[in-house]
């Protein structure tokens, strides 16, 4: 059995290791969100008092992290999790005065233009942000010089280059893997708009191992964990780091 405390990794993720692993697993909607955010934030300049949009915030772990660790004033926006449910998480975590929960669809954001210093999206952008027209829409909500950062599942080669979604990935996630692009794809996609300057586009080091560890812990410690996570464990084990991982991409609005 993989113990819950395997998620505490102060050597690599010192800030994330301060958080109760049981709390994190209880809010699970995707792999290792705080590890992804802590790594992504190394390429951003997040400062106390910034207004930050957490886009696709899920049950709210990343929003709590942004408020506590960086002193941000956070708007937590998600379509699948209602605002009352997320607000309860923020109240319990003691950040209700710094985090506002909003139910919003990513293509119809209810915010004023140029109202955020930064927008971050952790393990969500692949669901809504790959269309050519999306970045031009999203950057309208950033102030000039504002920052954008995403952590998203990635492949080491584009599906078009591979010729098809590999069987071990297709059998688990199906067509959704079409949205798992390389860091280089994201850099070109964003820079071609001439609306942002990409400041970093990289593959997370050993991201697939982090993902596998998270899935193993969730398989053991969530009520539905084995059924939900065993296919992912099998996919990652079969892949062995050849194709799967995460892209971390940051940019500034010009």
Image (cartoon, rainbow, N blue to C red):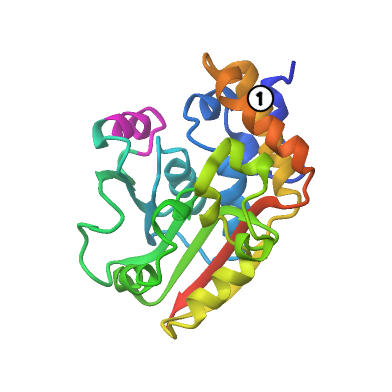
The x and y percentages for residue 249 are 57, 65
The x and y percentages for residue 28 are 50, 31
Q: Quadrant of the C terminus?
A: bottom left
Vertical placement of residue 206 versus 92, above or below: below
The residue lying at 53 percent from left, 30 percent from top is 24
Residue identified by numbered label 1: 217
Magenta range is: 85-95
Is residue 32 something that shows in the picture? yes
Q: Is residue 78 magenta?
A: no
The residue lying at 70 percent from left, 59 percent from top is 156
Q: Is residue 80 left or right of residue 198?
A: left
Dot 1: what SS? helix
Q: Is residue 76 left or right of residue 230?
A: left
Q: Is residue 88 magenta?
A: yes
Is residue 8 something that shows in the picture? no
Q: Residue furthest front?
A: 163
The residue lying at 44 percent from left, 41 percent from top is 64
């Amino acid at each position: 059995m993989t113990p819950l405390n395997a998620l505490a990794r102060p050597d690599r993720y010192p800030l994330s290791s301060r958080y109760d692993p049981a709390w994190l697993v209880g809010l699970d909607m995707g792999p290792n969100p705080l590890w992804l955010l802590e790594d992504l934030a190394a390429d951003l300049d997040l400062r106390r008092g910034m207004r930050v949009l957490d886009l696709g915030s899920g049950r709210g772990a990343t929003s709590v992290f942004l408020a506590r660790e960086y002193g941000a004033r956070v708007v937590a926006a998600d379509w699948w999790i209602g605002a009352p449910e997320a607000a309860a998480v923020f109240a319990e975590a003691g950040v209700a005065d710094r985090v506002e929960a909003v139910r919003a669809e990513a293509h119809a954001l209810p915010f004023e233009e140029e109202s955020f210093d930064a927008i971050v999206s952790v393990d969500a952008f692949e669901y809504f942000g790959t269309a050519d027209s999306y970045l031009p829409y999203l950057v309208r909500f950033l102030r000039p010089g504002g920052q954008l950062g995403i952590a998203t599942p990635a492949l080491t080669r584009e599906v078009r280059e591979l010729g098809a979604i590999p069987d071990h990935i297709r059998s688990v996630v199906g067509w959704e893997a079409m949205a798992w692009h390389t860091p280089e794809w994201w850099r070109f996609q964003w820079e071609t708009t001439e609306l942002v300057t990409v400041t970093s586009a990289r593959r997370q080091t050993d991201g697939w191992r982090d993902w596998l560890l998270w899935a193993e812990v969730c398989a053991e410690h969530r009520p539905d964990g084995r059924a939900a996570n065993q296919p992912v464990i099998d996919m990652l084990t079969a892949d062995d780091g050849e194709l799967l991982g995460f892209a971390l991409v940051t940019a500034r609005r010009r």
